[in-house]
Structures are given as C-alpha cells and as structure tokens.
Image (cartoon, rainbow, N blue to C red):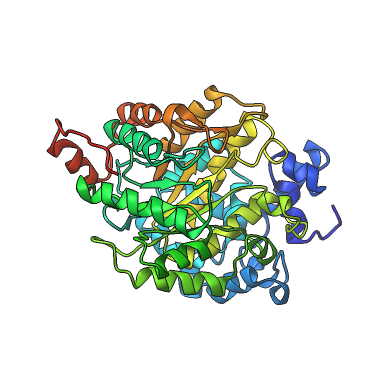
Amino acid sequence: MPSTPTLKTLLAHASPLRSGDVLAGVAAETEQQRVRAQMALADVPLTRFLSEAVIPYEDDEVTRLIIDSHDAAAFALVRHLTVGGFRDWLLSPLATPATLAALAPGLTPEMVAAVSKLMRIQDLVLVASKCCVVTRFRNTLGLPSRFATRIQPNHPTDDPKGILASTIDGLLLGAGDAVIGVNPVAEDVGSVSTILHLLDRFRQQYEIPTQICVLAHVTTQQRAMDCGAPVDLLFQSIGGTEALNRSFGISLKLLDEAWQQTLELKRGTVGDNVTYFETGQGSALSANAHHGVDQQTLEARAYAVARRYRPLLVNTVVGFIGPEYLYNGKQITRAGLEDHFCGKLLGLPMGCDVCFTNHAEADFDDLDTLLTLLATAGCNFVMGVPGGDDTMLSYQSTSFHDALYVRQLLGLKPAPEFEEWLTREPEREWRMIS
C-alpha cells in the first residue's frame, strides 16, 4: 500500500479473501498486507467517509444518493468514532435495538462495509441479531422470533400446473409468508401477466395473507400494470454503481417512477412496503462496472439504492454468480453474513438466498452452516425451493424442510398473520385452478 492509501485501497486490501477481488486485481497480495490494511482501517475516522468517495460524486448517481441522503443528525451519535471504535461500540451494550434503528439513516454503506471487515463471524452474527427491521404488505415481516420464507416455484417452461404444484407443496410445509415469487422463463408482458393472474386468483381463493411477485424486469412489470395485471411487489435486481445499474437497464429515475406506479395500486392490506430487490457480491465485476472497488463494499452500496424505496424484502443471492466471485463454502458463508450485517445496520429487511452453483467448491453442509448462522443472526427470510434444487435456474438453494429445521431448532414462527392462516383450517382441501 502507498504511505497514505485511499479509502478504496484500504477497503479492498482489508477485505477477507475472496476470489472476485483477486480476479479484479484489488485484493491484498498477502495475509500480512491484509492485516496491515485492517489495522490502518481501524484508525480511520468515520467522518472521512463523508469527504472521500470510493467512486467520485460527479461520476456516479449512487454516490450522489449516498451523500445527499445522509442524515447528519442521526450520525451525530457516532461521528466521533473511528472504524475500530465503531466496532467496539456496536459490540457493547450501548448498541441497543432502538439505538441501532435510530442510527441507520446516519450510516453510509462504506462505513458499514469497513466495520464488517474488522469483524469475525461471531461479531457479524451478534450485532445483526440486535437489528430488528419490520416491514408490512399483507402480513408483517421481521418481528422478533419470526422467520419467513419465499416460495420459489420456478418451472423450466412456466407451466401453470407446475408452478401451482410447487406453491401448494411449500404452503403445506409452512412456507410462503415472505412472498410467492416466480422467476419467469419468458420475460414478455403476456407471460408475466398470466403468472400474476394465476397466483393472485389462487391467493384469493384460499385467502392467503401473503404477497405475489413475478421477478421480471421492472419495465416489463410496469407494462403489466398498465394492462391491469395484479402486481403486489415491484421487483428489480440492483447494484452499487450507476454503471452496473445501467447494465441492468435501470436508473434511479426509472425506479422512482415504477415505485410510485406500484404504490398507486394500493394492494397492501397492512402496509405499503411494495418493493423487492435482489443483489449479490460480484455482480459489478461481472459487468465490468466495479471502478476498482472491492465487491463487498459495492454490495453494501447497493443497499443505499434499496433503502430509498422502503422495501418489503431485500435478498442477497449470495452464491449464485459462481466461484469466480465466491470460490467455496467458506467464502460464501462469510459473504452471506457480511451482507446480512451491512443491510441490517443500514435499516433494511434483509433476507438471503443461501445457495451455490453446481461448479462451486461448496455443498449442502455449507448451506446448513450458513442457514443456521443467519437464522441465529435474525435474518428476515430465506428461499424455499422444492427439494433445494431449482430446475429452472440450475442452482442449489434451501428447501421448505430447511426452513422447518430452523424454526424448530430456534423456536421461530412464520409471520403472525400467516401463522394464523396456517392453523385456521388444518384440513384444507387444495384444488388446482385453471
């Protein structure tokens, strides 16, 4: 490192080893260099993050969002601290759930990314467990002692019977309170609208207190709304740089318009958190949109975009991009806990797709470990995939049974409205709808 390294260099060199940073050429070259960077980062005042951007203000609208939306009054509580001092404060009894909730608007993504790099896994779990982020649409998510799941009933041909069969399978096993969310094979308005109408009729027929989402591009969902489709949640994949979001075909202006359009539908019954975002470490590098910034810091910057739209759900799809970015189970585990920690500190309702691709150095033992740690840390929700094997996206994730394991182990329950629905008619007769 140079004698006075930039924040961008310090953050990259202090980051725990992961294959994506090595691929990008920003990682520390030795463990000794990594430790020196962590020691130097610990002495950096938190106020420096407000005057030195990792991507210049004039070059990037995400940077402008971060700086322009910063809450100085909320930040006053910790503005005197260094990154290392902030770590100590977060681990102390002074950092109560109420205090952390009030502090969230005063933190920037780079601050929380920096402090996460100084933490062991137990620190990430402990601090995140003190962060309670509650959101509402047709039910209430994120309450203490609750653990939600998304039913992910993907089908290789978008076959309605296949989607409904997977949905019923999940509901019978107590899944689906976070959302019933389909990744469509076909991105056209007609196909997306067909799935939305199908699942909405099913939801109404059985009076299920949950929300429906088809994870198509935001512009496709807008056109579906224009055609009268029942859109509950507006979905979009987002990233931590303007260039990455441009590669996704989005901008903050576009998201602003789509968010307002979804709010105007007024489909929620207990709240109006109408957005669902997905992120993932390595996405900026894969799009050549990383600006030489390490992938974990860029992931945290994506949460600034999500925070703008008061989401119901934010999901870090932690192992989906592949071993080029997170090589093995150890790196996937660390990344998932970092993402959950950073998102919760920033005030987001974080979930995690505990997953890996088939060519990664990982297996279901690794997923069990991360799932258990995340649930202990207070993760809001995880995926529910039939058998843990998504045959449409061709990757491995958590199953409906995995969520039951966590609930039984830790005494957790589904969202309260959904729990009441599950117990109201235990002998419910399921019937396919056309």
Residue at image location 67% in from the left, 61% down from the top: 247
Q: How many marks?
A: 0
Residue at image location 52% in from the left, 41% down from the top: 123
Left or right, 275 with respect to 40, comes to: left
In the picture as drawn, the residue positioned furthest to the front comes out as: 434
x then y, percent, for residue 162? 40, 35
x then y, percent, for residue 192? 45, 54
Q: In the image shown, does 67 or 309 lie closer to the viewer? A: 309
x then y, percent, for residue 429? 17, 33
Vertical position of residue 283 compared to residue 163: above or below: below
Q: In the image shown, does 2 or 426 lie closer to the viewer? A: 426
Left or right, 11 with respect to 138, comes to: right
Quarter the C terminus occupies:
top left
Residue at image location 57% in from the left, 58% down from the top: 238
Q: Is residue 142 visible?
A: no
Left or right, 424 with respect to 37, comes to: left
Give the quadrant of residue 290: bottom right
Vertical position of residue 411 compared to residue 210: above or below: above
x then y, percent, for residue 279? 56, 51
Residue at image location 72% in from the left, 66% down from the top: 55
Left or right, 394 with respect to 155, comes to: right
Q: In the image shown, does 47 or 221 lie closer to the viewer? A: 221
Q: Is residue 333 visible?
A: yes
Vertical position of residue 185 compared to residue 57: above or below: above
Vertical position of residue 169 compared to residue 86: above or below: above
